[in-house]
Amino acid sequence: MAAISENIKKYRNKLGLTQSELVRKSIVENTTLTKIESDMVVKPNVQTVARIANALGVPMQELAN
């Protein structure tokens, strides 16, 4: 099972988005996204995951698997 950080990076890269672009699309703080992608935050709150998933165009479950 991949960590949420790996899944976010995978989908972000698949779409060709930089972290800054995903921050703008998801309305998530830059520091928050950076911490999630670097595994400093392993269980981000549901609202944050929902925003990121929506910006990436994937269901939340895809990021959590």
Image (spheres, helix red, strand yellow):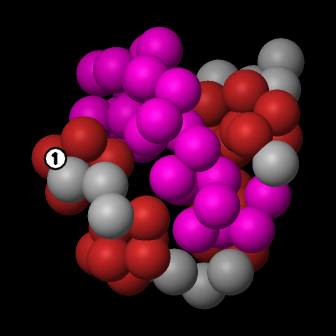
Q: In which quarter of the image is the N terminus?
A: top right
Residue 28 on the magenta segment: no
**Residue 17 vertical placement versus 5 (above, below):** below
Q: Which residue bears the numbered disc 1?
A: 31
Magenta span main SS? helix
Q: Quadrant of the C terminus?
A: top right
Where does the image place residue 48, in percent across and percent down from the top left? Answer: 43, 39
Element at label 1: helix
Q: Residue at x 43, y 23 (%)?
A: 44
Q: What stretch is highlighted in magenta?
A: 34-58
Res 19 visible: no
Where does the image place residue 49, in percent across and percent down from the top left? Answer: 54, 38
**Residue 63 vertical placement versus 11 (above, below):** above
Q: How crowded is mark 1: few (under 14 residues within 10 Å), some or many (20 or more)?
A: few
Which residue occupies the extreme front position in the image?
Answer: 47
**Residue 60 vertical placement versus 52 (above, below):** above
Using the rendered view, name the quadrant where residue 4 is placed: top right
Residue 43 on the magenta segment: yes
Number of dots carrying numbers: 1
Q: Residue at x 33, y 47 (%)?
A: 33
Where does the image place residue 16, in percent across and percent down from the top left? Answer: 60, 85
Using the rendered view, name the quadrant where residue 56 is placed: bottom right
Inspect the image, locate mark 1, and give the three-letter code of the amino acid beneath it.
Thr
**Residue 59 vertical placement versus 23 (above, below):** above
